């Protein structure tokens, strides 16, 4: 079940919320005055080492220049 949390409450505990999503695989929806503004979802398996969709960056072999 998706949990909603006010953005004011989420701000100081964002790291904790992100870890909870990664562990439970359940999304969390921060809200602003009761309106959903974003969804925090777990990354797909295998994507955790890929910072931006470019495998060469994750492996430390990005071209320089």
Image (cartoon, rainbow, N blue to C red):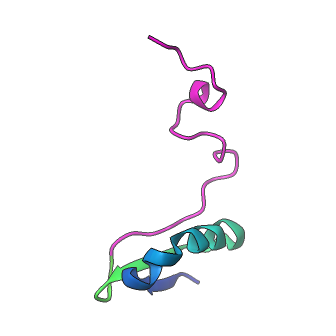
- Point 43% across, 75% down: residue: 11
Q: Is residue 2 above or below residue 22?
A: below
* Horizontal and vertical percent position of residue 39: 45, 69
- Point 65% across, 73% down: residue: 20
- Which of the image's four quarters has the N terminus? bottom right
* Horizontal and vertical percent position of residue 37: 33, 73
- Point 62% across, 19% down: residue: 61
- Point 38% across, 69% down: residue: 38
The quarter holding residue 65 reads top left
* Horizontal and vertical percent position of residue 43: 60, 55
- The span picked out in magenta is 37-65
Left or right of 46? Residue 31 is left
* Residue placed most toward the observer, 1 or 37: 37
- Circle count: 0
The quarter holding residue 18 reads bottom right
Determine if the magenta segment contains residue 50: yes
Left or right of 54? Residue 49 is right
* Horizontal and vertical percent position of residue 64: 49, 13
The quarter holding residue 55 reads top right
Magenta span: helix, strand or loop, mainly? Answer: loop
Q: Is residue 20 above or below residue 5?
A: above
Residue found farthest to the top: 65
* Residue placed most toward the observer, 7 or 46: 7
């Amino acid at each position: 079940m998706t949990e909603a949390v006010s953005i004011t409450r989420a701000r100081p505990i964002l790291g904790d919320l992100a870890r909870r999503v990664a562990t439970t695989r359940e999304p969390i929806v921060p809200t602003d005055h009761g309106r959903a503004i974003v969804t925090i979802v777990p990354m797909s398996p295998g994507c955790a080492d890929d910072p931006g969709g470019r495998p060469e960056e994750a492996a430390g072999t990005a071209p320089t220049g």
